[in-house]
Image: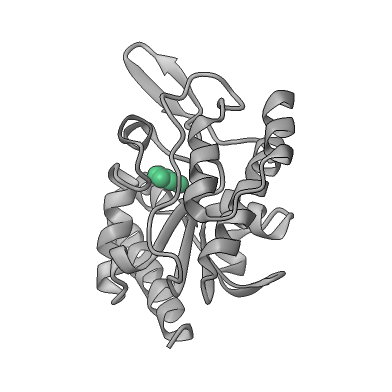
Amino acid sequence: PDKAVAAMARQEPATLAELNRIILAADPLVPGATQAVPGEGPVGAAIAIVGEQPGDQEDLEGRPFVGPAGQLLTRALEEAGIERSAAYLTNAVKHFKFVARGKRRLHQSPTAGEVKHYRWWLMKELGFVRPRLVVTLGATAALALTGRSVSVLRERGPMGFGDWNGFVTVHPSYLLRLPAGETAEQAYRDFVADLRRAREMVG
Ligand code: URA
């Protein structure tokens, strides 16, 4: 990790592509990930969406939001009138962290220290993309943008993130963990409503 920090300080990327080359070449802070997963989407996207960290499938494919939570996000974006390919999608932490349970790799949330370690990359990314609105999914992404612990269910909605206009909402993996039923359906509708409101904020 110290080596990675020193390397980052030496490298000052001039473009998003250069930043992504640095991200892809860096070792994970916690060993185990197959590869780094950089952000995806156009520079100049009106909306940037920030998740927590790549999951199992993202780690294998090298793309953000392609697993179950990503599929739910893609559906919700569509219902909210946001074209996934027009948004910039990324994560607070760029490597998958997990514990092995037999053949399964169980996701482990990043620590606050890990979020801080990766924050330099996230801020650089946003600096290149220059979105009009940054939407955080879940508490880890909100922590990365605010530097404090955010209760996403209580504080969901518009929030200033320093240089960025922000919007806090839940993470789609939270929706997947709710037992199927009316509560889960309502939680999904609330998520879509948040995304729609975010879309309206960028006009
Ligand atoms: N969850 C995230 O936060 N990000 C991904 O890329 C996938 C799942």
Please name the residue shown 61% across and 47% down the image. Answer: 121
65 or 23: nearer the eye?
23
- In the rendered image, residue 146, in percent from the top left (x then y), is placed at 70, 60
Q: Quadrant of the C terminus?
A: bottom left
Report the side of 1 relative to 154 (left or right): right
In the picture as drawn, the residue positioned furthest to the top comes out as 102
Residue drawn at x 73%, y 40% is 9
In this rendered view, identify the residue nearer to me: 100 or 58. 58
170 over 197 or under it: above or below: above
> Which residue corresponds to the image point at 66% horizontal and 36% vertical from the top-left?
114
Location of the N terminus (image quadrant): top right
Ligand 1 occupies quarter: top left
Q: Residue furthest front?
A: 14
Structure colour scheme:
one colour
Residue 131, placed above or below residue 20:
below
Residue 115: image location, x then y, percent:
65, 42
Q: Is 164 positioned to the left or the right of 18 in the image?
A: right
Please tell me in which quadrant of the rendered image residue 171 appears. Answer: bottom left
Q: Position of residue 103 (x, y in %)?
A: 31, 14
Q: Which residue occupies 49% across, 19% down?
A: 32
Question: Residue 57, image x and y in percent?
Answer: 31, 34
